[in-house]
Image (cartoon, rainbow, N blue to C red):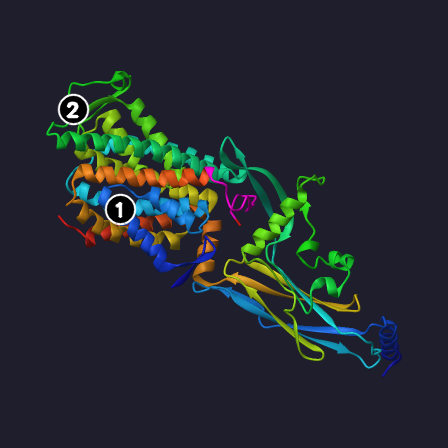
Amino acid sequence: MQIYLPIAELPVNMFLIFGMGAAVGFLSGLFGVGGGFLLTPLLIFSGISPAVAVASTTAQVVASSFSASLTYWRRKLIDFKLAGVLVVAGIVGSTIGVGIFTLLRRTGQLDLIISVCYVTFLGLVGGLMLWESIRSIINTRRGRPAPLRRPGQHGWIHGLPFKMRFKRSKLYVSIVPILAIGIGIGILGSMLGIGGGFILVPALIYILRVPTSIVVGTSLIQMIGTMAVATLLQSGNNHSVDGVLALILMVGGVIGAQFGARLGARVGGEQLRAMLALLVLAVGIRFLVNLVSTPDELFSLATLAGDAR
Amino acid sequence: MNAVGRFALLAGMTLLALRPAAAEQLVVALSTDNVKISSSFTGTGVTVFGAIERDAGTISRGGVYDVVVVVRGPDETLVTRRKERVAGIWLNRDARTYLDMPSFYAVHSSRPLDEIAPKEALMRYQIGFDNLTFRAREGRPQPGDEVFSEAFVRLKREAGLYRDAPYGVTFPGASVFQTTVDIPANVPVGTYRVSVFLFRDNAMLAASNAAFGIAKTGFEQFTFDLARRNGYFYGLICIALALVTGWLAGVLFRRD
């Protein structure tokens, strides 16, 4: 069934978009990530302009993160103080990100920067995750216990000033790295149309040493706040949020996520991480191929504001 | 009839008599004045009907009539960019910004254009892709400009927004013609100008203009306007929509 998208200004197959939302939702439920990093490229590859794809996915991430956060909230697995600091930093970051986004659209380099960022971050995070999960799978096979984190262990991060106490996470840590992470994720998220969970979660675990049980719920709150502000700014500055597209994606996404989460509960954590890592790497490689292979069409048309035509 | 009235009538008749000898006139009608874009819009067609009227005094000449129908969408300024390989990566480098190009352009004719009229006439009225006026914002013409204007037309044609039909205008009767211009789903909204040209023996005899509008309607119009005019308010609605959808899903599929 074809439906005309009022902001993207083209008709799309509603079931195709719904299917994409559901498939990505399934994977995000399975792996516990937002799925923006899969959804935005899928939309771009299916013909929706990068600007509309990024902005509409931003709205979709708000819905899926909120839906997922409810469970963590009921189980009290959220550090609201840490999430609050992250959200404030995230809002600063997404304001900067949307500004850069608007500027890049005008100069015609948006697609390039989006691709380069995808290649860099997906490659980096996917590679690290794969390495880490393969190592721990091998360790488990050989019967060696996974290296435990000792509470007394401190890195240079913990020597930084402006310390703040986060009771829920049992942390007493400088807010400088927290702000830096929040701003960084905010910039990336609003520019790339991703929640950034796949970067935020490892960052919170490995850099700040937030307990694993608290990490997911807390990062979901950060995503809701940051992406909501990004949606608002994208809509106000670039008029590129397609409400109809976003709604179809949201409904597909939240339904798919339920089934994904059910399957995820039956698969081992290490195997899941390795699969997610492969998926992240595959998307990154797809972008890399696009960047380096000779395109069929060297020319492109765009309006002065940067809308592809 | 008073003196003034009689004078006016006389003056009118004199004016009529003074009109050029080529007295063919075009009467043009469109199948619609208004194309409405609703949620189920997947493109449409606009039929241009016309009649060639000749008054009694017109000398009958040999040769056949040729009709060219041009439909132009609202003007837009577009940047044509070319990718180049830099350090192994393909990125946009050189660009030309063409001012006031038709966003949609269809040219239908009864025969191929080069058989109908000489190049100069076609260029004067911007008939045909090759005869569009490309005004680059970059100013003075530079070497390699044609590559960009050719790419512009090629991309527009691939998008279905520039189309031609060399035998698209048909004559159901000796002096009645018609053609249907396909409007694809991705057309921009605005006023579309229809120009009809009548040629014979390489000379233009008459021209006539008409117009139709393409506009979003109902929900599509409302959403688009809201997003443009009150972007922040629209953004808030989208966020509310996201939160409600997320909450509903969380409640409906609650598992604990």
Q: Residues within 10 Å of mark 2 (few under 14, many from 20)?
A: few
Quadrant of the image occupied by residue A115: top left
**Lateral position of residue A98 relative to residue A139, left or right:** right
**Magenta segment includes A304:** yes
Between residues A249 and B163, which one lies in front from this camera angle?
B163
Residue B160, position as x, y percentages in the image:
55, 58
Residue A48, position as x, y percentages in the image:
44, 50
Q: Residues within 10 Å of mark 1 (few under 14, many from 20)?
A: many
Q: Does residue B177 sit above or below A146 in this rendering?
A: below
Q: Of the two numbered discs 2 and 1 on the same chain, state the one appearing first in sequence.
A: 1
User: Please, what is the three-letter code of the amino acid marked with disc 1?
Assistant: Leu
**Lateral position of residue B110 relative to residue B103, left or right:** right
| Range of magenta residues | A292-308
For image coordinates 56% across by 67% down, the residue present is: B34
- For disc 1, the marked residue is A27
Disc 1: host chain: A
Residue A227, position as x, y percentages in the image:
34, 41
Disc 2: host chain: A
Label 2 secondary element: loop
- For disc 2, the marked residue is A149
